[in-house]
Image (cartoon, rainbow, N blue to C red):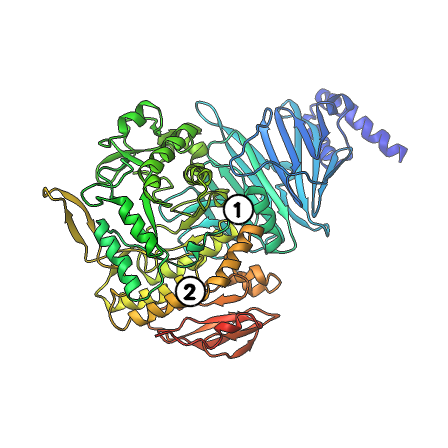
Amino acid sequence: MATGVLAVAAAYVLLPGLAAVFGLAPAAFLITQYLWGTGLLAAPRCQRRHCMFEVRDRSLLWRGGTETLLVESWGEGAVRVRSRLGDVVDTDWALLPAPETDATVTVDGDTATLVCGAITVVARQSVGRDWQAGQLGFDCRLEFRDADDRILLSELSGGGALKRDARRFEPLPGGGYRATLSLESPADERLWGMGQYQDGTGDLKGSTLELAHRNSQASVPFLLSSAGYGFLWHCPAIGRATFAANRTEWVAEVADQIDYWVVAGDTPAAIHRAYADATGHAPMMPELGLGFWQCKLRYTSADELLEVAREHKRRGLPLDVIVADFFHWPKMGDYRFEDEFWPDVEAMTAELKELGVELMVSVWPQVALESENFDELSEAGHLASSNNGIDVQMWFEGPSRFIDMTSPRARQWLWDTCRRNYGDRGVRLYWLDEAEPEWGIYNAAAYRFHAGQAQAVGNVYPQHFSRAFYEGQAADGVEVVNLVRCAWAGSQRYGALVWSGDIASTWEALRAQIVAGVHMGVAGIPWFTTDIGGFYGGDITDPAFHELLVRWFQFGTFLPVMRLHGDRLPSHPVEAADGSRRLASGADNEVWSYGDEVYPILRDHLFLREELRDYTREAMAEAHRDGQPVMRGLFHGFPSDPETWTITDQFLFGGDLLVAPVVEPGARSRSVYLPAGQTWTELATGTVHEGGRRVDVEAPLEVIPVFARGAACADLIGRRPRS
């Protein structure tokens, strides 16, 4: 042993000098690098003092060269990791302040360990002279383990001579960095979450996703793994996430800091509970969110809208909310009703309330250059800015710019204006459209906000849009649920009901919404809906569209919120009294608009939704209390059944109902997978099936296959259509 130590010491002291004398520098370099890489040769103490662990209150700090790495306990079984060249900075993009959590931190030489509940973080530092670079090399890699000491994931290893970086900051021209985090994770894991994308992909392992919002795409960067962890990329920058077999990689195009949060949990339910604690719980869904919402593009006047609500009541049909869509205003950005078409808003909202119906109004974040508010907003600096060229950011019915939702002053202005022109006139619900925001051209490098360049902070925009209204409404004592076209992490705490955007009226789009809804729930957004029937392309005279609408309506009956909407064909022109043009209105889109064969089916599902009200209320309570999705993947309730992680055309509505929508034209039956470890009762027939297998079930046009877990929902079993 002593001989070995002396040999290593001699190699350390003598090899570089002797090699230089005899022209053997390359060999010395290789030998020395090998000895350091294997741990047989350590850096001298005078070098090691430059790289130290520091134990803080429930956290671990490491400094190496110019990098600071901070690992903190952040909730039960969870940690937050930040890395920066320089000192880390505090940001609250989505994470709430860290709660008091028991955690222990120990340091043993080059290894430090932080234990917080079910998660253990192992940090391993290495220090050595890089003879090629002519300087000391500092490195620290993190490994995350569960309570059974299984590795959940780890930062990418250096790979010996490969010299790979787990955390990489690449300088950008003009300042700032492009930040990359590389991780190793189980090759056989299943991954769900990340918000909504429209490609219909279920398990995301093997996928690359754009970290950016678009119309019908919401990037919510929280991921659930079948290996037993959840991961939040706590960075609102535009970027990319890749979930390959050999590594997971997160890229922020512009970011000075890498920031992420990891939680370990035995079940998806436990992980969702911890994630809601970390980023905020959804409010309790108001009672009106449990029923049916009626909408179309667009009701052009108070008379037209009121007549639809009256007809619902004449027919005895349930209706909780009716929506006044966009361009009820004179100019975009006026944030008020146009008097000619909506002459007495107070009387309209009062009559609706007498009918038991609430009015929702559309609010866009765009302000037309012709708006009565444009000059005020521009002068106050409340609008997003273009970095180059003409300051026009969108063109729909004329040029416009976006309100800067990252500015607290701009948010306050918007809420004050909407409260005065809508809230004080009886409106309690808002439809926050264009929330991505939908730039005329999706080029984030072209725009900047109060909070920074759009490339660096742009993904937080929809969260702040929801926040502007939530904070104002909550201060006024209003129960908040606002429809919004996009979301980011933390949006759920601001009462955001996300719908899936302007999707097509196609069977392919219907199938994609099942996956999108499950992914959104996993990503922490429990309130989700779609335009029943799709947004564009549906002709109300086309029998093929009638079938699609029926199947979509059945699916919508079991969504967190049931809402009929769309730009139906053929459209109708609209003119003011002076003959000037207004935005057109789509065809009728009420449940009685599609003929005698369709109407009874839609009517029956309206009543079915009402019969589900108590059940839906409890599912919403679970979302509020425990952060559980309302629309769930089968894996949520049955994570130990590997088949459930692969299913993309079924879902759980709450904890006890398995829903299998019909998603193929002409289909009158379908195959359904029933998770193992449970019996399942078919609601339509009362037939009981054993789980762990597929069954073929009948699905005539008027029936959607739904199964109850065990003895749950006995009052719905054998239910017959209501006349």
Picture coordinates of residue 14, whole percent (x, y): 78, 23
Q: Residue at x 31, y 27 (%)?
A: 377
* Pick the front one: 488 or 167: 488
Q: Which mark is residue 379?
A: none
Q: Which mark is residue 222?
A: 1
* Pick the front one: 630 or 400: 630
Q: Is residue 440 above or below residue 550?
A: above
Q: Is residue 425 above or below residue 386?
A: below
Please state which of the two labelled residues, at mark 1 or mark 2, is closer to the viewer.
2
Of the 4 image quadrants, the one containing the N terminus is top right
Mark 1 or mark 2, which has the lower sequence index?
1
**Is residue 163 among the parts visible in the rendering?**
no
* Pick the front one: 263 or 75: 75
Left or right, residue 638 beside residue 502: right
Report, in whole angstroms, how far the alpha carbon at label 1 lies from the one at label 2.
33 Å
User: Dot 1: what SS?
Assistant: strand
Mark 1 and mark 2 residues within 8 Å of each other at the beta carbon: no
Q: Is residue 550 above or below residue 433?
A: below
User: Circle 2 is placed at which residue position?
Assistant: 610
Q: Using the rendered view, name the quadrant where residue 410 is placed.
A: top left
User: Dot 2: what SS?
Assistant: helix
What is the three-letter code of the residue carrying label 2? Glu
**Within-10-Å neighbours for mark 1: few <14, some 14–19, many 20+:** many
Query: Residue lying furthest left in this view?
Result: 579
